[in-house]
Amino acid sequence: MNPAVGFQQVTKRFGPVQVLHGVSFAFEPGRVYGVLGENGAGKSTLMKILAGYEAASEGSVEIGGQAVSFRGPRDAEAEGIVMIHQEFNLADDLTIAQNIFLGHELTRHGFLDEREMARRAEAAMRSVGLTCSPGRRVRDLIVAEKQLVEIAKALSRNARVLVMDEPTATLTPSETDRLFGLIAQLRDRGATVLYISHKLDEVERITDEVLVMRDGRLVAQRLTGSVTRHQMASLMVGRELSDLFPPRQPVPDGAQVLLRVRDLQVPGWAQDVSFDVRAGEILGFAGLVGAGRTELFEGLLGLRPASCPAVEIAGRPWTRRSPRSAARLGLTYLSEDRKGRGLHLRMGLAENLTLMALEQYAQPWLAPAAESAALKQASEAFGIRAADGVPASALSGGNQQKLALARVLQPQPQVVVLDEPTRGVDVGAKRDIYFLIRRLADEGRAVVIVSSELLELIGLCHRVIVMRQGRLAAELPQDQLTEELLIAHATGTH
Amino acid sequence: MQLEPTKTLSAEPVSPAITRRWAGLRGGGPLAGLILVCVLGAMLNENFASLDNVMNVLTRTAFIGIIAVGMCFVIISGGIDLSVGSMAALIAGTMILLMNAAAGAGWAPLAAILAGMACAVAMGAIFGLAHGLLITKGRIEPFIVTLGTLGIFRAYLTYFSNGGAITLDGSLNSAYGPVYYGSWLGVPVPVWVFIVVALLGGLILNRTAYGRYVQAIGSNEQVARYAAVEVDRVKVLTYMLLGICVGIATVLYVPRLGSASPATGLLWELEAIAAVIVGGTALKGGAGSITGTVIGAVLLSVISNILNLTSIISVYLNAAVQGFVIIAVAFFQRGRK
């Protein structure tokens, strides 16, 4: 039987800011815990302390009642505590097997034992449902496969406490099912799984107990069966949550078509895609990971090779397609990849905000005062909370996302394409973003939302297009939107 | 767009203190270094602080300093140009040949010199354009492209000069001399040009949309591309700006010796890159300053001046000292991510 692992009065300060206030808790072996909390509630910091990435300012991690101190994640791993990160810790140019054994290479007579490592890597991969060769380079894998490699890596280290941070963000429903099967297996073997997620339906499905954190404190511990999703959300924000989605206004009859796309081809990703979006309309794009939704819009914007004989923005033909010409004609795109493509993390907030509409501020010299005024206005309008003069990397996920949204709205576009607008964002910020999207449509803009969260599409959109393997598989009006129907079309089981 | 303020639900802690402290250090470090070296110089040699010597140092700084201002743009955008020394040599040689030919064809000295100057700046811009296009459209690493042209430019100069020197026609010397030797209000002409180039550079980098785009690309090229920045155009322009700076520096340099040889501009790339890095600009791009670059350039030539005036370290080791300085600075920059 594994000893219980826990925290004893753990406190953490970053400079003058205290992010954890004396958290104590013990995790029983053989249980799955859902760790809930808004961005900034302190759950990531707490988990990083558990896995040895951060040291507690006061208090300690305990194993079987004994205080232990980790000098780094390696020490924690030696105790069987492994964390799977939201951002992958994989070396892109190494193979799957090399990644799984990175830092723990097996040797024979002083040389690497490639065959044994490949064999064991394959066994670990099979248990997570990865069927490709362990000799494949990680760079060539899709995001969902990388996620599975991370999990296989943790399994190969004989984890008895496994921390998973948003593990399903990039997985398809069937991959998620497989992961949940795996978590159940681990639990039955006596491991403790700490599951961090904003997806409350998953937390409800897979966990035995939920721990709710708020403002650096553990505020509630409940058996999962005893609370509803709505109660979980209320516990997280510390007050009763009103409706997540704003009421919908119908698209006015005869509203102008603001984006018209005909026969778009993105080689390898999307074929024969045609659609229209009208003023005041919110159009959703649903589909599995790899169905080509993001690539479709990247192709449309000229960010990857694509051909499109006919695109019109607000009735004007769009010929030389690039993000620049799109912005000039009145279309902007928010990438799903906030850190890699959405924001300049090392740059300041005002610089980030104004980048897409810099002409407005350069007459001909940039006016820092006008830029800070714009930031102040946007902070109020979008509810961005930040100290002065910090780089974008200092913001929480929710605030970063609001800043990224504010950036793509700076050029005053008529058409906005938002790819995963609420990925990795807590419930409170999600609601703000939903109301903002609603308002954009009410102002007469055309809004396109690409999302993997079906509830989001159902709650917001007037119409949803389902993509499957690069083609438009179905187009569903508002009154037909159900999770079952969307999944059926996305998987081709309709 | 008018939106009503929405309530924020989450309060996230941010810790600006650390970032600020680093920013402060980055601004002050090079200047503190310069002051320290100057105090040292004044203690070691009584001539160091004389006005003559100060003007001498600044004049010598001008060539590298002007190139470093252009280099600063390239490095901030995430690129590099190793060819500037060879480029300066080739421009110098070609420019002298052109001026000699013009003078031989009966042009007035002033007309010949102006034609030479225009040719120098145009060549710099064209070389920069070629670099930029190979790097962006050709998708070749800037290191490789400019390593290649480093060899090409110098080899062509050696070929044109037949391994010797290309010398400016005697009739032009006296007309061209003041560009290097002349002064206005007691300040030598090259120093004036350096000041103007640095001020323009600072203005472009900090107060124009173009300068912001340069920083955005260096900070994260992919993000900049998605934010509707015309990445290729901006990058090509940085190399052209640098080429123009090399052209200007060469225009000032030619009257100094009145000739170009295979040794002209040797190791200028080291000095220019070192000036930028010593000035606090990170080699991986994203952020940097013209002020820092100017201070870095002055600092490096003050060091070489001290070596000249004193006999503590042989002047032959000048490049070694610069090498040590750049490695030391990079060492102290290390912690900053």
Image (cartoon, rainbow, N blue to C red):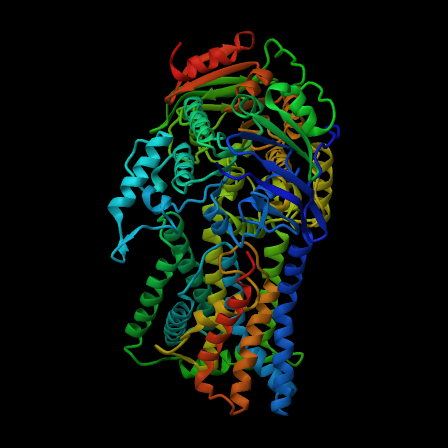
- Quadrant of the rendering where the N terminus of chain B is positioned: top right
Q: Nearer the viewer, residue A470 or B50?
A: A470
Q: Point out the residue furthest to the front here.
A: A1
**Quadrant of the rendered structure where residue A229 is?**
top right
In the figure, B50 relative to A392: above or below?
A: below
Q: Position of residue B224 (x, y in %)?
A: 52, 44
In the rendered structure, the answer to whether residue A81 lies left or right of residue B133 reads: right
Q: Nearer the viewer, residue A23 or B42?
A: A23
Q: Position of residue A55 (x, y in %)?
A: 60, 51
Q: Position of residue B319 (x, y in %)?
A: 45, 78
**Quadrant of the rendered structure where residue A47 is?**
top right
Whether residue B190 is visible to the viewer of this picture, yes or no, is: no
In the figure, A275 relative to A87: above or below?
A: above
Q: Position of residue B180 (x, y in %)?
A: 53, 79
Q: Nearer the viewer, residue B70 or A152?
A: A152
- Quadrant of the rendering where the C terminus of chain B is positioned: bottom right
**Residue at screen point 52% across, 82% down:** B304
